């Protein structure tokens, strides 16, 4: 079974536009991320349809609530057949442990990842919410908590990936959003609300297992060709 390292972010407003894009992709080359916008618009039926189409689905809803509520949400997500889901590490140890326990022990259970620090936040943004630390140090502490609580990995910036790989070891999954094509990284005139971004190749070299890529594929004239180009970049 193939294990594609690219996760295409379906950050789209409706099921029809998402499915039109998905029909131009291949489950051999990518998995799919369904986040809050699309899930709110299209709900579980779309997720189930993507799973039936052969795609691994990363349900990116970033659960963050009291432990029992998060555990029940994780159970519901597991019934949809998703490949991976995420919670916020800032929810704490009890919440993380409840989420992991809710997913059971079956080999085909969803992988549980914990979001460390959102890629939209820099040191100034962290200070505003009461975290007087750098994103790198905060991500390190939260990754250690997630690993100790039984999570399979974390969602982190590629800029923290190398340090977290050394800290957490080879078996701990690192999922990196904020991935851009090499041309887009550092480019001028491209609106972007993510501050800590990286190219696909640099993220892989830093130790990332999976790359969440949106606009480089979803806005391409030929999404499948763009996807193949990213694969060539990370395998060069």
Image (tube, rainbow, N blue to C red):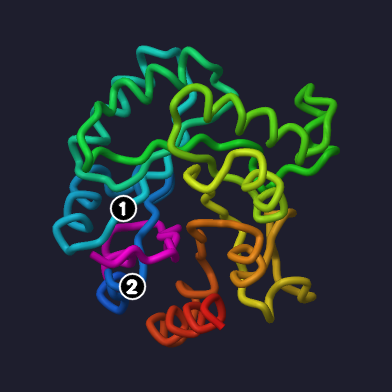
Which residue in the structure is indicated by mark 1?
Answer: 57
What is the x, y in percent for residue 23?
25, 75
Residue 194 in magenta stretch = no
Quadrant position of residue 108:
top left
CA neighbours of label 1 inside 10 A, class few (<14), some (14 to 19), many (20+): many
**Measuring 30% from the left and 79% from the top, which residue is drawn there?**
24
Classify residue 164 as left or right of residue 223: right
Q: Is residue 21 above or below residue 118?
A: below
Q: Secondary structure at mark 1?
A: strand
Q: Quadrant of the C terminus?
A: bottom right
Horizontal side, residue 75 vs residue 91: left or right: left
Coordinates of residue 182 in the picture (x, y in percent): 67, 78
Name the element at disc 2. Answer: helix
Q: What residue is pinned by disc 2?
A: 21
Q: Is residue 45 above or below residue 231?
A: above
Relative height, residue 179 to residue 86 (above, below): below
Q: Which mark is residue 196?
A: none
Q: Earlier in the sequence, mark 2 or mark 1?
A: 2
Residue at coordinates 18% horizontally, 50% vertically from top-left? 48
Measuring from the top left, give residue 101's x and y in whole percent. Answer: 32, 20
Q: Which residues are magenta?
A: 1-21
């Amino acid at each position: 079974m193939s294990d594609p390292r690219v996760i295409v972010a379906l950050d789209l407003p409706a099921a029809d536009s998402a499915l039109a894009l998905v029909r131009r992709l291949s489950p051999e080359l990518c998995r799919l991320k369904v986040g809050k916008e699309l899930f709110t618009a299209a709900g579980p039926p779309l997720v189930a349809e993507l799973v039936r189409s052969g795609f691994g689905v990363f349900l990116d809803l970033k659960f963050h609530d009291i432990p029992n509520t998060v555990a029940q949400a994780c159970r519901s997500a597991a019934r949809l057949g998703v490949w991976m889901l995420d919670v916020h590490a800032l929810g704490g140890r009890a919440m993380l442990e409840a989420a992991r326990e809710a997913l059971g022990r079956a080999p085909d259970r969803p992988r549980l990842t914990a979001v460390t620090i959102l890629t939209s936040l820099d040191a100034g943004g962290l200070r505003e919410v009461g975290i007087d630390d750098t994103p790198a140090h905060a991500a390190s502490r939260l990754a250690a908590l997630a690993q100790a609580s039984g999570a399979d990995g974390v969602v982190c910036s590629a800029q923290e990936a190398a340090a977290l790989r050394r800290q957490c070891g080879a078996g701990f999954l690192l999922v990196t959003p904020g991935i851009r094509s090499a041309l887009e990284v550092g480019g001028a005139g491209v609106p972007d609300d993510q501050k800590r971004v990286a190219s696909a190749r640099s993220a892989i070299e830093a130790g990332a297992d999976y790359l969440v890529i949106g606009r480089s594929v979803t806005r391409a004239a030929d999404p499948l060709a763009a996807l193949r180009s990213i694969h060539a970049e990370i395998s060069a």
